[in-house]
Every structure is written in structure tokens, then in C-alpha cells.
Image (tube, helix red, strand yellow):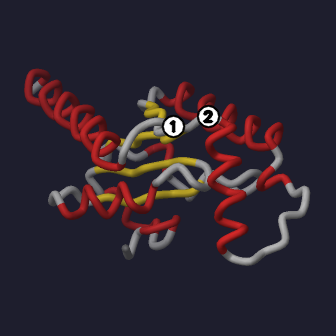
Amino acid sequence: VMHDDGHMTDDLELADVVLLGVSRTSKTPTSIYLANRGIKTANIPLVPNVPLPPGLERLKKPLIVGLVASAERIVEIRQNRLLGLNAATPNTAYVDREAVSEELALSRRLCARHGWPLIDVSRRSIEETAAAIIGHLSERRRRAIVET
């Protein structure tokens, strides 16, 4: 939880996994699930016009994974979140389908540019998302052993 939602990014190199994603892509529950499995996990929100933590793109040790979902799913979850907070649902970019689609496109481009795997969480449980991440982590570790 210390490295949740972009906190304490100075020591990201100590993480096994860094999750990136727009708001409401299940970064925190996935991080907690992985941590309970002994995997050191940090998560960083991708927020429009907010720079990534310095040095993130140069990290070597942690597996960096992008989490995405369909724009429809993200908008639905965000609208429900606002309702749960008793917040008025103004026509803000937070719940605007086009704005959310652009956030997701930026996320996909960032991961593609760096070769970071992307996992679509639209129809996945936290356990299924974690299993996919563990699969990527295991494959990465296997390749590292073969290369040495």
C-alpha cells in the first residue's frame, strides 16, 4: 500500500512489478493481490497532463505492465464511483467517453513505445489479471536465466 497510486516512486527499482493504468483499471486491488502472493508491486496512475515519475522509463528490474479496459467499461465504473461518492455527475472528462478513449489510447501508445505488456481487464477478475501478470513475470525470469 506504500507504493499505491503513485506514492513513494523513488524506489520503484525495488519492485518486482509496476502497474500502470488510467483510473479504474483495478491497479490497487491487483497490487494487493500480488503483494499477498509475495510479489513486490507498485502502481502508477496514468493521468492526462501529469508526467510519469522521473526515471520510470529507464527502470530495468521491475516488470512494467499496462492495464487497460474498454472505454465503455471505464466510463461505467467511473460513473458508479461518482454516484457512490454522492458527487454530481457533471459532464467532465472523467466520465466523457471520448476523453476516456483518448486516455486509453495514450496508455496503449506508451506501453507499445516501451515494449511493456498490456492486459485488458475489461472482463477479467482480479485473480485472472494477477495470473496474467505472474505469467509475464515468470516468462521474463525464464528468459533472464537463459540469457545468463
Q: How crowded is mark 2: few (under 14 residues within 10 Å), some or many (20 or more)?
A: some
| Percent coordinates x, y for residue 36 in the rendering | 20, 64
Count of marks, rendered view:
2
- Nearest to the observer: residue 126 or residue 83: 83
Q: Which of marks 1 and 2 is nearer the N terminus?
A: 2
Apparent side of residue 98 relative to residue 27 in the rendered image (left or right)? right
- Nearest to the observer: residue 44 or residue 129: 129
Q: Residue 70 carries which label?
A: 2
Q: Which residue is drawn at 66% across and 61% down?
A: 80
| Percent coordinates x, y for residue 38 in the rendering | 15, 60
Q: Which residue is drawn at 45% across and 72% down?
A: 8
In this view, 58 is above or below 79:
above
- Nearest to the observer: residue 27 or residue 91: 91
Quarter of the view holding residue 110: top right
Q: Which mark is residue 2?
A: none
Instruction: Point out the image quarter for the C terminus.
Output: top left
| Percent coordinates x, y for residue 142 in the rendering | 12, 28
Q: Which residue is drawn at 50% across and 43% down?
A: 57
In this view, 17 is above or below 3:
above
Mark 1 vs 2: CB contact within 8 A: yes
Q: Residue 122 carries which label?
A: 1
- Secondary structure under tag 1 reads loop
Q: Residue at x 36, y 55 (%)?
A: 30
